[in-house]
Image (cartoon, helix red, strand yellow):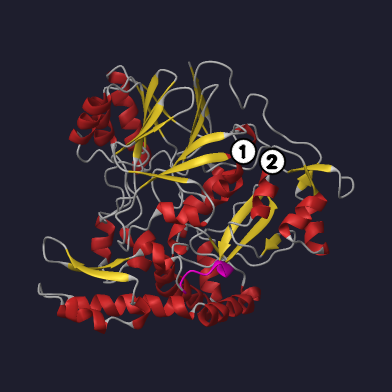
Amino acid sequence: MGGSDDPVFLRSNAIVEPLVDRFYAWMHIFAPVQASMNLANLQVPLLESYLQDPQIHTTASANPALRGGYFVNIEEARSMEVAALLDTIKRDRADMLEFAAAVAQADDMLRQSATGFDLTPLYPKLPPALNGLVELAYDTSNQPSVHFIEPLTYTSPIYDVSRQSVQLSLDDGVERPFILSTPRLPQPGVLDLDIPFHHPGLDELFAARTKPTTLARLREALQLDDEQAAQLSRLLTDAPSLSADRHITSGGRIRYFGHACLVFQTPESAVVVDPFISTDNRHGDRYTLDDLPDHIDLVLITHGHQDHIVLETLLQLRSRIDAVVVPRSSRGNLCDPSIGLYLKAIGFNVIEVNDFDEVPLPGGGRVVATPFLGEHSDLDIRAKSTYFVQVAGASVFVGADSSGIDPALYRYMRSHLGDVDMAFLGMECDGAPLTWLYQGLLTRPVTKKMSDSRKLSGSNAAQAAAIMMELGSDEAYIYAMGEESWQGHVMATSYNPDTYQMKQIEEFLGWCGNHGVTAGHLFNKNEWTW
């Protein structure tokens, strides 16, 4: 590459890992209330456990049978760095740890003192860390709970942008450590930027995927020193690697980018669903960031799980997205943080929707938010949505992980919105238990038997068939369920042809064949045009 004023582009295979206190960032460790709970109840104990016996953690991390377990995958030789991270967290995040303890105290107080009578006398007994940030309430079954005034928590001591940083590196095809358990320490060849996620310099950098910039300009925008500038230069190239067919000039197109990511295009509009996109363009067997349109009108987020709202992809697209459409939360429920507040804090323009709200598309067409059933371990989570995307004369149901446990729902949806041409469904029908993802938020213990009964599961074969019967769709496509090789650091799943989920998909595809429904099990990439 030439001098610092020559035109440059960000390499296609640049990896971006947004970090919060060195852990891979996702909503439950970013949103202030949930981040405090996970820090106190999950991350601090996890680091303490590692320091007691690093070898147990590294051995377990290498065991395929324990993939996706909460083990810190850091070699013992670096344990002192983990100890330093833990000390920093305990010192600098004392407000968050105190807040989490206060939530537990308030829950205990309600359990003992909220007996159906007036809650007013309990306010003076709240821990000081909660004052001004919560309301106490009963539901109609007389069960008491703490409701958080979530917007204010983003202005309180438990939200600190100094927790945020970004790591940049090049994708070499090697699976990264599991995101929920392993903090990211400094590494050779990895550029660490101690800047918050909303920093405008990041937009300057990521815009360089499609538009030229200069190393000098990036150095100024990101406030880099000489060493950092030299590291950044290795992530840059003198020519873009954009795909020539990333736009269309007529009709409509849907592309499947892997996992649950769909890209809808017309000549006038582009809609991306749940962007989680590979950066490794060496293989030709997948769409990557090179294949995305230069401008994106809407991003649709179906729900807040870490494999559907993926910040490492979203941050790179922020400068080319008009708005992100997200389902509205229940406002103040501990297990249901606001996706809208989360993304607004990072600098996105957000449209929050309730069921059956509509968002128009340029050039005609619309997106309609529709109900999402189940898949959240029976927790009271409202921030989840499926979508009807009606574009270029086609009507497509984007089902994400919504379950068919009550098929009548889909009958109502069809009567309200009309026939469906294509349906995309999730069939992870034997998902992880409640505590795998939500243990940090639980204020009361649950038994293993109870947790195992409440899984993060989508539809089985019979439920998927029931959805199709009610929607009346002629085509059905099942998402890959973390099967793509480049998703292991987020999904940590392992399947074989005899796995229950795969057998259920095979059974459903057989049902489709017997009922004249065109169907397929998606993997890596696919395309439909009309």
Q: Going 62% across and 70% down the picture, which residue do you hit?
A: 75
Residue shown at 24%/62% (left/top)?
Answer: 449
Q: Amino acid at mark 2?
A: Arg
Placement of 138 over or under 433, stated as above or below: below
Judge from the rendering whether residue 237 lies leftward or rightward of residue 384; answer left or right. Answer: right
The image quadrant that residue 296 belongs to is top right
| Front: mark 2 or 1 | 2
* CB-based contact (under 8 Å), mark 2 and mark 1: yes
Element type where label 1 sits in the image = helix
Q: Position of residue 406 (x, y in %)?
A: 19, 39
Where residue 447 sits: x, y (%)? 25, 67
Q: Secondary structure at mark 2?
A: loop
In the image, residue 470 lies at what x, y percent?
A: 22, 27
Along the polypeptide, which appears first: circle 2 or circle 1?
Answer: 2
Residue situated in front as seen by the camera: 480 or 205:
205
Where does the magenta region start and end?
A: 157-163
User: Which residue lies under the disc numbered 2?
Assistant: 209
Q: Pointer 2: residues within 10 angstroms few (<14), some, or many (20+)?
A: many
Residue 242, by quadrant, is top right
Q: Is residue 167 above or below residue 162?
A: above
Task: Where is residue 283? Give x, y as percent.
Answer: 65, 35
Say which residue label 1 marks: 289
